[in-house]
Amino acid sequence: MEAMPYRLDLERQPFQAPIGEVIRGGEATSTDWRNGLPVLGGAQVIMRELRASDAPSLFALLTTEEVTRFISPPPTTVEGFGKFIAWTLRQRTAGTYACFAVTLKGSDTAIGIFQMREMEPGFATGEWGFAIGSPFWGTGVFQEAAELVLAFAFETVGVHRLEARSAVRNGRGNGALRKLGAVQEGLLRKSFLRNGEYLDQVLYAIVDDDWRFSREMSRPIHASRVH
Ligand SMILES: CC(C)(COP(=O)(O)OP(=O)(O)OC[C@H]1O[C@@H](n2cnc3c(N)ncnc32)[C@H](O)[C@@H]1OP(=O)(O)O)[C@@H](O)C(=O)NCCC(=O)NCCS
C-alpha cells in the first residue's frame, strides 16, 4: 500500500464487469458500489466518496512531513489533489478501486482517506492503505474508519484477502495494522523507494474468514443465550 496512494500512473483500461449481484464463495456480494460508494456511518466517523471540494483539506492535512514520511509522495498542489480525486472516481466506476474520505460526524471536511484496489480481476484479493491528518492520530478515528472499510471490503465488495504493505520503520502504520488483526506474512526487502532509499516493508493480510470469526467473537454473548 505504501506505493499506492496518489499514483496516477496506475490508471489502466477499465475491466468492466456487469453491475449487480455476484456470487463468490457461496455468498452474494454487490457490485453496485461501482455506481457510487455507500456512506458508511460510525459513532464518530462518516466515510463517504471523495469530492472535488475535498482537495484543499486533503492537501493541507496529507502533505505534511509526518504523514508522508513512509508513503508515496502525494500531489504537491491543490490542483494535483483535484486530479487525484477525479482519478479515484474513474477507477471506482471501473470496479478496480475505491477511495473513501474520512470525515467526522457534524463536519463534512475530509481529514483523511482509505483506499483499496484490486490485485486481480474480480477483487478476490485487494490491497488497502490509509492516511489521516496528524491532528487526528491516536483519537480512535482510525480504528472506527478501518472497521467500516473492512466491512465494506469483505461484505459489499466480496474481498477474500486484503493485503497491506507498511515500511518497517513506520511504527504507527505497523501498530495500526496489527491492532486490526492484520497478520504479518512476510518481509519485502528493499521494496519501496522513498527519498532515494529502498525501504524494507512488512506484508500484512487479513482474510475474510478470520475477519468474520473475530467480529463474531467480539459480539456480546448474552445476545444468543437461551435460558
Ligand atoms: C496510519 C495511520 C492512519 C494510523 O492512524 P493513527 O490514529 O495514528 O492510529 P492509532 O493511534 O489508532 O493506532 C496506531 C497504533 O500504533 C501504535 N504505535 C505508535 N507508534 C508506534 C511505534 N513506533 N511502534 C509500534 N506501535 C506504535 C499506537 O500506540 C497505536 O496503538 P494503540 O491504539 O493500541 O495504542 C496514521 O498514523 C497515518 O496517517 N500515518 C501516515 C500515513 C501512513 O503511514 N499510512 C500507513 C500506510 S500502511
Image (cartoon, grey):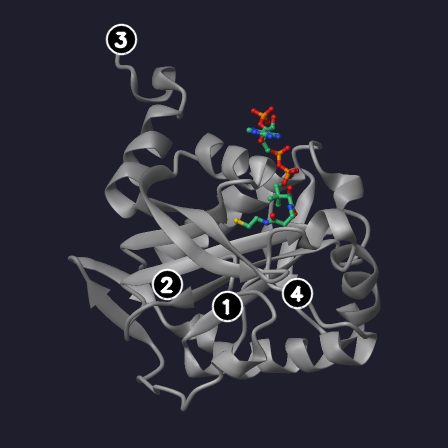
Height in image: 49 above or below 221?
A: below
Check whether the beta carbons of the residues at disc 2 and disc 1 lie within 8 A of each other. yes
Q: Give the amino acid at mark 1.
A: Ala
Give the left or right position of residue 120, taking residue 24 as reference.
right
* Residue at left offset 69%, top offset 82%: 83
Height in image: 65 above or below 171?
A: below
Q: Determine the secondary structure under disc 3.
A: loop
**Residue holding disc 3:** 227
Q: Position of residue 215 (x, y in %)?
A: 37, 33
The quarter of the picture where the C terminus appears is: top left
Whether residue 104 can be seen here: no
Instruction: Classify mark 4: residues with Cα within 10 Å, few (<14), some (14-19) or many (20+).
Output: many
Check whether the beta carbons of the residues at disc 4 and disc 1 lie within 8 A of each other. no
Q: Determine the secondary structure under disc 1.
A: strand
Decide if ligand 1 comes within 8 Å of the CB at mark 2: no
Q: Position of residue 218 (x, y in %)?
A: 39, 25
Q: Which mark is residue 73?
A: 4
* Disc with the residue nearer the chain's start (2 vs 1): 1
Q: Nearer the viewer, residue 61 or 220?
A: 61
Q: Give the amino acid at mark 4.
A: Pro
Height in image: 172 above or below 122?
A: above
Q: Give the amino acid at mark 2.
A: Val
Decide if ligand 1 comes within 8 Å of the CB at mark 1: no
**Residue holding disc 2:** 157
* Disc with the residue nearer the chain's start (4 vs 3): 4
Give the left or right position of residue 31, taking residue 128 as reference.
left
Q: Nearer the viewer, residue 199 or 2?
A: 199
* Disc with the residue nearer the chain's start (1 vs 3): 1
Distance between the alpha carbons at the discs numbered 1 and 3:
45 Å
Q: Give the amino acid at mark 3.
A: His
